[in-house]
Image: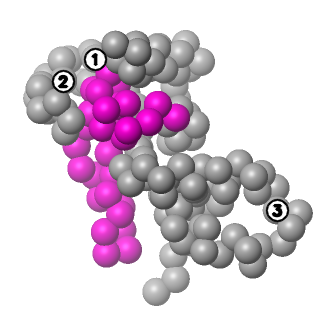
Amino acid sequence: MTRWYHLACAAYRRPDALLETLPEAPPELPDRARLEAEAQLGVAHRRVPRVSTADHAATARATCRHCKEPIAKGAWRIALLYYEDGRVMPSGFVHASCASGYFETTAIMPRLAHFSPALTAEDLQAIEGEIGRAYST
């Protein structure tokens, strides 16, 4: 079965497949360097393709997949998706402050902005601040 992805979504969710086919793409492909860099990040950090949306926790029932602590109601959290058997499947959350430990990088903001279009610039800045604060401590 053939599955179709937007180029950015392929770079974020299926980095191996994108990097495999990129040499066959036309040289004038828009954003080629950015797509390749994002795909390489996903290959280098195996959990990065799991990044999905970011939002405030609606309840305090979810548990962080990194620290195993509850995610407080109203706290920033990052949803995770796994790619299995040709489909993406929801797989829990991590605290925004646990993102650098879980993903082993802080370079996830382009993915969060892409998959969370309703977030404002201030929201993205707040999330980035939590990720950066946790990384620097």
User: Which residue lies at the image location 53% right of the left edge and 41% below the top edge?
Assistant: 111
Residue 93: in magenta span:
yes
* Vertical order, 130 against 52 (above or below): above
The residue labelled by disc 1 is: 75
Which three-letter amino acid code belongs to the residue tagged 1? Ala
| Quadrant assignment, res 4 | bottom right
- Residue 45 shows in the view: yes
Image mark for residue 29: 3
User: Which residue lies at the image location 52% right of the left edge and 35% below the top edge?
Assistant: 107
Q: Is residue 37 left or right of residue 125?
A: right
- Residue 77 shows in the view: no
Residue 55 position in % (x across, y down): 37, 27
The residue nearer to you, when weighing 59 against 7, is 7
Q: Residues within 10 Å of mark 1 (few under 14, many from 20)?
A: some
Counting every numbered tag in the picture gives: 3
Q: Is residue 68 left or right of residue 89?
A: left
Q: CA distance from mark 1 to mark 3?
A: 39 Å
| Dot 2 and dot 1 residues touching (CB under 8 Å) | yes
The earlier-in-sequence mark between 2 and 3 is 3
State which quarter of the image contains the C terminus. top left
The residue labelled by disc 2 is: 71
